[in-house]
Image (cartoon, rainbow, N blue to C red):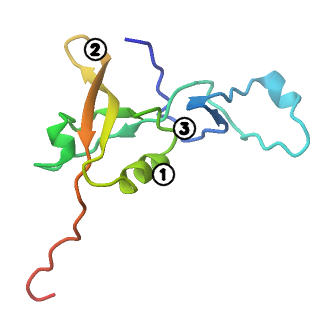
Amino acid sequence: MKPRKLLLLSPIVVAVAAGTVVFVLTPTMAMQQSQGTIYPKSIIGAIGVMAFVVKTVEPGSAAEQAGLKAGDLVTDLDEQVNSIEEFQKRIWQSKPGTAFRITYLRFNSATGQLEEHHTTIRTKAFGPPAKTSGS
């Protein structure tokens, strides 16, 4: 398993190239900023990847069939995910039955470590909620 650092304290991603976060701001870089470049006012000094945190898994869903559980951290959807918007767009614009290779991290309480897992998930057709009687 390749080591990963997660940045869950700040949603700021300033520059991304080829699926990798490439922006690192040091005090020296801040002093050397060029005119017109916008830098954040604050930093935390951590470098990481964006992760989609699984809050719940619907029974019978593609997520359940792929083995995802609440608390899992999805980092790749065929490739590294750089924003929640990108994650949603990839899924929402895919045809039903599209297969995505995903990478996710799951906490192992026995070892106290995040463990990397890989699986394939297939999208399902979206249907609007059924109308209930009286609406």
Residue under label 3: 10
Q: Tag 1 or tag 2, which sits nearer the N-term?
A: 1
Q: Can you see residue 39?
A: yes
Residue at image location 29% in from the left, 25% down from the top: 118
Q: Secondary structure at mark 1?
A: helix
Q: Secondary structure at mark 3?
A: loop
| Viewer-side residue, 100 vs 16 | 100
Name the amino acid, label 3.
Ser
**Image position of 26 with respect to 14: above or below:** above
Q: Tell whether 103 sits left or right of 110.
A: right
Which residue in the rendered view is the most extreme toward the bottom? 134
Q: CA distance from mark 1 to mark 3?
A: 16 Å
Q: Tag 3 or tag 1, which sits nearer the N-term?
A: 3
Residue under label 1: 85
Residue at image location 31% in from the left, 15% down from the top: 113
Q: Nearer the viewer, mark 2 or mark 1?
A: 1
Q: CA distance from mark 2 to mark 1?
A: 31 Å
Q: Tell whether 74 sits left or right of 123.
A: right
Name the amino acid, label 2.
Gly
Q: Residues within 10 Å of mark 3 (few under 14, many from 20)?
A: few
